[in-house]
Amino acid sequence: MSEDRTEEQRKSYRPIDAAGFRASIARDWGPVDRSVVLPEGLADAAAEHRRKLSAALPGRRIAVAAGRAPVRSNDTDYRFRADSDFVWLTGCQAEGSVLVISGDGDATLYLRETAGPGEADFFANARDGELWIGPVPGLKDWSDALQLPCRPIEELPSAVRGAVPAMLTTYGVEPLLDAFVGGSGAQELRQVLAELRRIKDDWELDQLREAVAASVQAFGDVASELPEAVRGGGERWLEGTFDRRARTAGNGPGYASIVAAGNHGPVLHWVRNDGAVREGDVILLDAGVETRTLYTADVTRTFPVTGEYTPAQRQVHDLVHKAQVAALAEVRPGAPYRAFQYEAMRVLIEGLQDWGVLDVSLDEALGPDGQQHRRYVVCGLGHYIGLDVHDCDAARPETYFAADLDVGMALAVEPGLYFHPNDETIPPELRGIGIRIEDNVVVHSDRLEILTEALPITTDGLEAWTRSHLPR
């Protein structure tokens, strides 16, 4: 090889600097599909949500941002997931977009246009260039789909300028918004949005039903893969099985899935999911599919790897089932939010007393200076569900924990018992057993809708369900 050729190979040319490349890349591109496909009813639901927010904060100016994907490592980002309040108000999931609502309730969505063939960023910008990320809806596409005026993000500074009336913002989500407005009223805005989101409308409830149905299907997928997990795939294999269904049926898992086999079951947030799965174990699977509209289920079942509980596993599961039945009976309009949790705790305490694990009275255990039973059930036993797995957490205590249940509320109800393998207060045969049952429910005026009813909760029912999914 000649020295000239070797020297040429050592040189590095940037296409952006080459006139020939720039002229070539900018021409002869045909039309592409940038249309926005939205579920029926989404635009109307979002418009009604904006109306409710404006009514709750009359005369206030509001800015809510979608956010941006955080950096995972160096030049790679995590997958983008839009801010839940932003999605509730817009139905849009465009990264970097901002909703501005004027004092008279008029709303405008500010979006970042992707770079097309006529701009250098088309090929030079890996974040916004269509050559890198593919066709993305533009302002008109979003406006037509959402029936909402859309403007370029570059106009955002003028839209949020001015101190009268003061603007409420979701601080810390969008750097542009933070720079122009700051953290004005962020806590107040989040609080109002959380309290509005406690009551789900019919469209939202349909999204939750879809999320739960997909999750039930994914639970069945996991059960069918138990033999492969035992052969060596372990918890990772089962996690991947659930995730595959979640990505196929929806946006993905709604939160970090808990796939806890054997002694990992008592670990409340076992999300490492890197353990072995053995015959004789039970699997505590806490996972939910997030729909493409970002509503998520939150479901838990604890089922035996072989399709049969051991006597000790059955003993614990039967008590947790009894607590679940007692809790569900208390979920109705007008009941205190804490009533279902109180009943579940009562049943668990009485069971622990019968087993000789607790040696204090029910009144002492439930009293403010007692709580000895919480050694075995440290977590809460329920919460709201919706766009967030723990929905509406920014609500004031008097509108959440200290309030009454109402029609349209969607809840997770999840009693459990968690006996760590090194807990010497527990009989040896019960150590290392963690059992949780978690149902997703909706409060109606005349009934309790159990969205997860397709998954059994009894010991016998879960044995039969597991066996029905194991390969023959």
Image: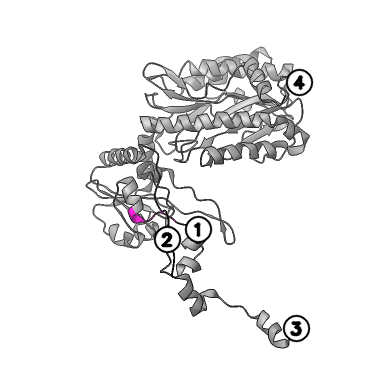
Q: Amino acid at mark 3?
A: Met
Q: What span is colored magenta in the figure?
A: 135-140
For label 2, the crowd category at 10 Å Cα-Cα, with few meaning under 14, some 14 to 19 and many 20 or more, is many
Numbered disc 1: secondary structure: helix
Q: Does 84 sit left or right of 257 as displayed?
A: left
For label 1, the crowd category at 10 Å Cα-Cα, with few meaning under 14, some 14 to 19 and many 20 or more, is some
Q: Earlier in the sequence, mark 1 or mark 2?
A: 2
Which dot marks residue 114? 2
Tag 1 residue: 133
Can residue 168 be seen by looking at this rendering? no
Is there a contact, CB below 8 Å, between mark 1 and mark 2?
Answer: yes
Is there a contact, CB below 8 Å, between mark 3 and mark 2?
Answer: no
Q: Amino acid at mark 2?
A: Thr
Q: Earlier in the sequence, mark 4 or mark 3?
A: 3
Residue at mark 3 to residue at mark 1: CA–CA distance: 39 Å
Tag 4 residue: 429
